[in-house]
Amino acid sequence: ELPDQVPMGHIPRTLSVYLRGELTRTCEPGALVTICGIFLPLPYSPMRQMQVGLITETYLEATHVINHKKRYSAMDASEEMEHEIQRLQDSPNLYSMLAQSIAPEIYGHEDIKKALLLLMIGGVTKRMDEGMKIRGDINVLLMGDPGVAKSQLLKHIATISPRGIYTTGKGSSGVGLTAAVVRDQMTKEMTLEGGALVLADMGICCIDEFDKMEEGDRTAIHEVRKLTASQNINLPNALLSRFDLLFLILDIAQYDKDEALARHVTHVHRYGFNPDMAFEPVRADVLRYFVAIAKQYVPSIPESLCSYVVEAYVMLRAGQDATNDAQTAMTARQLLSILRLSQALARLRFSNTVMTEDVDEAIRLVYVSKSSLHEEDQSGSSRHKIYRVILDYTRDRNETSVSYSDIEPLVLRKGYTQVQLKQCIEQYEALQVLQWSENKTTLHFVM
């Protein structure tokens, strides 16, 4: 019985179902099924019947099974779905559109929604000849103040994924998450019962209130794949480094953002749906089918891009300052994270080749997630840091001018946006430090 269908004050009920012949292995742990069958009493031996009296065990002899939670690979295609996917592929801003279609009633969190979209698509899992396995699944950690929609984002992801499970760390022990040994009531034999992580196999497991778990239970899932958690940052470094992206969402008072958020929330509360967007949000079933097709691609990184990725990782390592603690330090695992995110972005384009733009966006997401862990004045300091990036780039080349097309990808890779770059240029232009060329393609330093 599903948790949301259990009557108030009751515990979930169970029923034994027998599947024979062709019906065996038609469903698996974690599947949501509708079963048609014949309700029968379990026959006892005469001696056993004398012992139990008029009480008897019952079971359902299954005749038909309908699976509602299918794996991505088992999804049925339809002409309408194919048409929708083709329409999405023709859209110029596909990445942003799909990300904003995740929980559209929740305001903001654009980069987090992009990270969750890439989590659903995932990278490519590789197996070496010696048997070593390099995971392709992406792990995301959401932390922050109460009331910033962490749990709602997790629940939405669990509903989109065909094998998504949402659970809380507070009510789940290590046994409840992995597996439990239980005694079968009829045969009296010991059997294994799957926990949340088993039920979400080949899907997404969303664990809320992760920090409320016991320390011993937390270690039980160190090696678990596809894990999403929401918590405060009092976790061991060995566990933190296993997450590809860590986002710290703080509830900071800012008049413009607070006003836009309040208008959004009151609209949703009044009308029951999100305000009009620049596009029609993608339906959950279309998004699910899109992810299923994207997962069929196996993108690889061309040889020409390898040196680019290596250089970017070395710059990330060199950019660490002395204030970085062990929790946010850049490790070799972050290099694999960049590769996984790049592959997920290539899958998003239905491509088998990773491009430079994919690596740049992956690096930007890593930068954004790292910078969110450091509390600072994001408006003033970001403009100054962007200016330092432009200045250092120009000085390294012993020049007094720089092309806008050269610095734009460099700044975006550092985790900043085009809006922040333009605001920085406007500010330093007003201070008569920078000056545009006539055709607005080159920036000159006023000496």
Image (tube, rainbow, N blue to C red):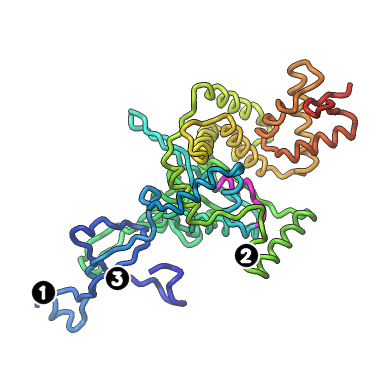
Q: Which residue is more in the foreground, 391 or 437?
A: 437
What's the residue at 80%, 39% (across, down)?
Answer: 423
Q: Residues within 10 Å of mark 1 (few under 14, many from 20)?
A: few
* Residue 300 image point, x, y percent: 46, 30
Q: How crowded is mark 3: few (under 14 residues within 10 Å), some or many (20 or more)?
A: few
Secondary element type, mark 2: loop
Cα separation, mark 2 vs mark 1, equals: 60 Å
Whichever of callouts 2 and 1 sits on the residue coming sooner in the sequence is: 1
Q: Name the residue tied to disc 3.
A: 15
**In this figure, which residue is indicated by the disc labeled 2?**
273
Span of residues in magenta:
107-116
Q: Give the residue at mark 1.
A: 45
Residue drawn at point x = 75 percent, y = 33 percent:
386
State the SS at label 1.
loop
The structure residue drawn at horizontal position 50% and vertical position 59%, both measured from the top left corner, is 168
Q: What residue type is labelled 2?
A: Phe
Badge count: 3
Q: Is the magenta stretch mostly helix, strand or loop?
A: helix
228 part of magenta stretch? no
